[in-house]
Image: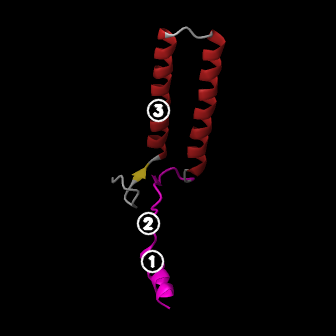
């Protein structure tokens, strides 16, 4: 697995969901630390956490919606480099 956005970079739906959950867990711990140190309105904390949970649910649903139907093919980061054939064509246009 590489991290340069190339075609070899793949992440499964399960791994993507785990990363999202880990991220939100860390966010909750940061907020929990702030709440422990600073006096905050209880209603504000409940609302904040509810909204974070809604956002987490949306992200997880998007991951699920983009997963292949068979559930076996891993997700792949998009390769943002143009295909060599497209580069060649664009170069030929510029030369003309």
| Upstream in sequence: badge 2 or badge 1 | 2
Point 46% across, 70% down: residue: 82
Q: Nearer the viewer, residue 31 or 14?
A: 31
- Report the residue that reaches farthest toward the top: 39
What is the CA distance from the residue labelled 2 to the residue labelled 3? 28 Å
Q: Quadrant of residue 85?
A: bottom left
Report the span colored magenta. 69-96
Secondary element at image label 3? helix
Q: Are marks 1 and 3 in contact (CB under 8 Å)?
A: no
Q: Give the residue number, with chain letter if any, for mark 3.
A: 23
* Crowd tier of the residue under label 2, counting other residues whose Cα lies within 10 Å: few below 14, some 14–19, many 20 or above: few
* Crowd tier of the residue under label 1, counting other residues whose Cα lies within 10 Å: few below 14, some 14–19, many 20 or above: few
What is the CA distance from the residue labelled 2 to the residue labelled 1? 9 Å
Point 51% across, 10% down: residue: 38
- Report the residue that reaches farthest toward the front: 95
Q: Is residue 72 magenta?
A: yes
Percent x, y of residue 11: 43, 49
Q: How is the image coloured?
A: secondary structure
Q: Is residue 83 magenta?
A: yes
In the rendered structure, find residue 87 and report the number of the disc placed on it.
Answer: 1
What is the CA distance from the residue labelled 1 to the residue labelled 3? 37 Å
| Upstream in sequence: badge 1 or badge 3 | 3
Q: Give the residue number, with chain letter if any, for mark 2.
A: 81
Point 55% across, 8% down: residue: 39
Q: Quadrant of residue 9?
A: bottom left
* Residue 74 visible here: no
- Report the residue that reaches farthest toward the left: 1
Numbered-mark total: 3
Q: Is residue 86 left or right of residue 60?
A: left
Percent x, y of residue 69: 57, 53
């Amino acid at each position: 697995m590489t991290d340069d956005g190339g075609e070899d970079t793949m992440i499964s739906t399960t791994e993507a969901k785990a990363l999202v959950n880990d991220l939100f867990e860390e966010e909750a711990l940061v907020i929990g630390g702030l709440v422990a140190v600073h006096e905050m309105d209880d209603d504000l904390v409940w609302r904040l956490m509810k909204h974070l949970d809604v956002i987490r649910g949306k992200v997880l649903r998007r991951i699920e919606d983009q997963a292949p139907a068979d559930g076996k093919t891993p997700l792949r980061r998009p390769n943002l480099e143009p295909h060599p054939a497209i580069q060649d064509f664009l170069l030929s246009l510029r030369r003309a």
